[in-house]
Amino acid sequence: MIVKVAPNRRDRRSSFETLGQYITEGIWQSGDRPDRTSWDDLTQYITQQSVLDALGDEVEKTIAVEAGNVLSLQTAAAEMRATAEQSLRATNPVLHLILSWPEAERPDAQAIFSAGRHMLGALGLRDHQYLIAIHDNTENRHAHIEVNRVHPTTYRPARLAWLHKELHKAAREVEITHGWSHDNGLYEIVEANGAKHVVPANERLEIERRAGSHGADRFETWSGEASLETWCRGRPADALRSALADRRTASWQDVHATLSRFGLELRDSGGRGMRVHDVGQDATEGHPRNVAVSASKAFRFMKRQDLEQRFGPFEPIDHSRVTPAPEQTYKRDPAKRLERRLERKALRDALHERFKAEQKDARELRALALAALKAEFAADDRARIETLKSSYHEMRARIGADRSLTPLQKQQAYMLAKLTHTQRRDQQREQMRQERAVRRELLPALPAWRAWVEAQALLGDEAAISALRGMVYQDKRDGKVVDASESDQPIGTLAPATPQSTDPNVRALKRLSWQVSTHGTVTYTFDTGGVAFIDAGPKLRFAGAVVSEDALRAALQYAADKWDGDLLLDGGDQVFRERVARMATEMHIELRNPDLRALQRQERLARPTAPEVSATSAAHALDPSAQVLPAEGHRRYVGRVVSEDQQSVVQHLGRHSYVLHAKASFDCAVPAVGAHVSIRYAAGKATAHSRLQHGR
């Protein structure tokens, strides 16, 4: 489905009447009255099929109309104009949208009306006055939507800053709902984990690369560890992709050799399928683990048909050609992983014991304070109750002693006194209840688990931060809250190349201070002001759309130290991604994004980092018998400079004698290699003078 916004008149005099007449032309052939109304502010005029058949070639273009939030189709234009005139800010209140379907799709009127209402809802115009007219006079069935930008009750014009973006997103959502074919635009549809998702067009490739199967996602959710499928899409996939791109890879055994570097083995699963098995040795049990995944899920770019056309029929691995020790395996050290999980559990158990101890002390303190309050105010409350009772009894006594009242009058007076006493007693009880509530607010509050953990996390307690992050994740799974600090990501994030279940860390870093939020994230700020980065557990985020050089360098170094390996950059525009790649190359940090890895290789080739040869080593290379001694003060050295490095120069004095001069000692220009100079020291400073060589 294609969605377009029709341009308005340049003189800003677009007319509701003219547009309405155009889009509804021919609807009266249905025989409906134009002033027909509806109870739900929704009136539909649909031309019956019998009428269309009778008209034949003379059928008009409009076959159905829906009028919303107006009294009738006949009065729709006048109502829209009257509403728009109530707004002082609406310069051009007419909005004209067009929805069009491919020639092969002929949706019915109700489906088109539903799509139109969804479009209006996406723009926040569902309560505005509108007309939806369906035209069928071209090869493509299409619909026109005329809507009043001005709200019919508030008279405020709608703000449509991201009009095209919202329309494209809503169009993809409607296509999924009705099962229509998908058009491209600012948003596209990607199938991942058995479901269709609407994503921005520039994020499609990244989502396809990182999307996992339902089983892999479920394993990672419940275990907190990366599945074999997810792990294979990291370094093993990069290595295999490079091997297949290399024309020197000429057989199935070359493919097996590449996978064996990561403890993986490719096997025939029957039925033209292949599976990737983890054959790394389990350090705790000493036998291979029976963990496998479909090759089509682990390496989506690898097709068996393509490989057989290139290498011939599938061949199993030849173990004699495989390197016995893999570089890296799926489960590097299960014992250490289990040890870390047990350590985290022990920390959280100890945290809960501390909470229970503090809660017990708080209950005892609260009980003592409550008893003290009761003892202090109990006598006053009893006195007030007794005073009220005494007043009631005195009133009854006065009524009984009054001889001017008849028995009937006394009975009525007693009833009135009792009613008055009851009202006063109820008022006094309510007043005392409110006073007790105020006094109870002065008592020390009992600590709640969530609030107590947040308070401990703000103090930098590692166990509390870990527990708080667990609560936040559980809230997200339950759909209770949305972490606003993580939902707004104006720029990319740093994460480990292999997903890890990690909590934010509190570290004492040079020039940086930390602060823990109520979501369990740790924000690092510079001592001079400004946020450097935010540790959100499994990823590092930046605070805004502009990241300084110091903040980027600090984040890269922190991420590399935290995850002890390669990193992955998610999101960010191309300029920012290239900037991160260049700085990471400078800091000798690897990024596992395919596009950034290529950029890092280009950076390394552009500025080779060959190891520097020291001046002393260069002198020994020229003369294996050279004796290089450091220069002494208050002496003069004459000879040719034969080598140099960043800190020093070496001067040849004759035969196998050489002297080493520090460049920092010269108070003038440092002599160049090949110059024959006289170097004299005075007061710790060296001065070089050029000398002419005599002889041949």
Image (tube, rainbow, N blue to C red):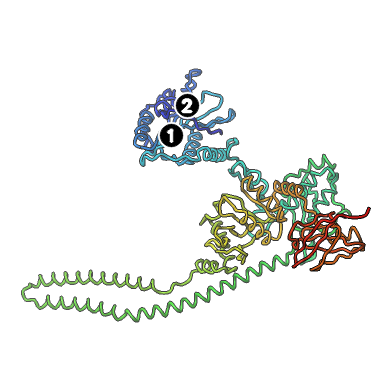
Classify mark 2: residues with Cα within 10 Å, few (<14), some (14-19) or many (20+): many
Is any atom of residue 305 visible in this view? yes
Give left or right: position of 318 versus 336.
right
Most extreme residue toward the top is 57
Q: CA distance from mark 2 to mark 1?
A: 19 Å
Residue 351, image x, y percentages: 57, 72
Disc 2 + disc 1, Cβ < 8 Å: no
Q: Which mark is residue 147?
A: 1
| Up-down relation of residue 9 to residue 351 (above or below) | above
- Image mark for residue 63: 2
Front residue of this view, candidates 630 and 428: 630
Which is more toward the observer, 405 or 622? Answer: 622
Q: Amino acid at mark 2?
A: Ile
The label on residue 175 is: none
Q: Is residue 246 above or below residue 427?
A: above
Question: Image quadrant of residue 191?
Answer: top right
Secondary structure beneath disc 1? strand
Select label 2 or label 1 by which is in front.
1
Q: Residues within 10 Å of mark 1 (few under 14, many from 20)?
A: many
Q: Position of residue 210 (x, y in %)?
A: 67, 49
Q: Height in image: 336 above or below 216? A: below
Q: Please determine whether, in this image, residue 504 is positioned above or below residue 198.
A: below
**How many circles with numbers are drawn on the protein?**
2
Q: Residue at x 51, y 23 (%)?
A: 137
The residue nearer to you, when weighing 276 against 147, is 147
Three-letter amino acid code at the position of disc 1: Val
Q: Secondary structure at mark 2?
A: strand
Q: Find residue 509 and report its image quarter.
A: bottom right
Could you tell which of marks 2 and 1 lies nearer the N-terminus? Answer: 2
Position of 264 compared to 225: left or right? right
| Position of residue 433 measured from the top left corner of the image (x, y, whole percent) | 32, 71
